[in-house]
Image (cartoon, coloured by chain):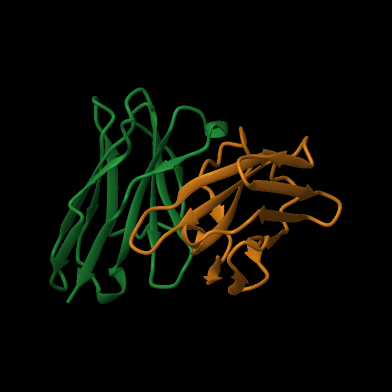
Amino acid sequence: GESVGLHLPTLSVQEGDNSIINCAYSNSASDYFIWYKQESGKGPQFIIDIRSNMDKRQGQRVTVLLNKTVKHLSLQIAATQPGDSAVYFCAEIISGGGADGLTFGKGTHLIIQP
Amino acid sequence: AAGVIQSPRHLIKEKRETATLKCYPIPRHDTVYWYQQGPGQDPQFLISFYEKMQSDKGSIPDRFSAQQFSDYHSELNMSSLELGDSALYFCASSLLVSDGYTFGSGTRLTVV
């Protein structure tokens, strides 16, 4: 079935470096995408979202890029800090489509090396 | 700011027992969602409620049921528990689908 997935289960970066986490989706009808951060034993925490009518959105130290042509989503984290260590999920939804459950990707575990 | 409150935080049950998980959404949020997350897995959507009516249904087993009450809190009832039901159960709430969902801290259910 159609699903959202991440390319790498684990990503290790040096503290202070930039990190890029990728996600490929296959449902071309999805029009709303969210990145979540999940620390061990905690619920997913909203980071940033983007709608299909945009190709880039910036937050504090984070940028989400959306390439609808190749159905690709990425999360860029600038100047990574130890507190960024977590599992990152992308999620998709067709807003207003009557189905309001998020479809999550498989998650990338970001490890920040000192 | 008030967040999504889930109770209990941890629950241990034996096989074939029943369990009830509770979720209190952010005030004014009218939609509640339930997700199940197995060890090392991504969250899987179970069911959602909007204005106390079931809104959408995902991969929720027939042994599970849920409802949303007049104060908008929701309960997930799980019967005939199986070992495979051991997981983190998250509740999320939103005011609009396009509003981004806020997740609670989850209930860790262990079936022994």
Q: Picture coordinates of residue B49 (x, y %)? A: 38, 36
The quadrant of the rendering that contains the C terminus of chain B is bottom left
Residue pictured at 69% horizontal, 45% vertical:
A30
Q: Colour of chain B?
A: green
Foreground residue among A99 and A93: A93
| Residue A38 left/right relative to A52 | left
Left or right? Give the position of B111 relative to A102.
Answer: left
Q: Quadrant of residue B15?
A: bottom left
x, y percentage for residue A87? 50, 64
The chain drawn orange is chain what? A
Of all residues shown, which one is farthest toward the right?
A: A69
Image: A51 above or below B62: above
Q: Is residue A67 above or below residue B72?
A: below
x and y percent of residue B39 in the render?
A: 38, 72
Q: Is B48 in front, or is B93?
A: B93
- Please name the residue shown 17% across and 57% down the image: B19
**Residue at 32 percent of width and 56 percent of height:** B89
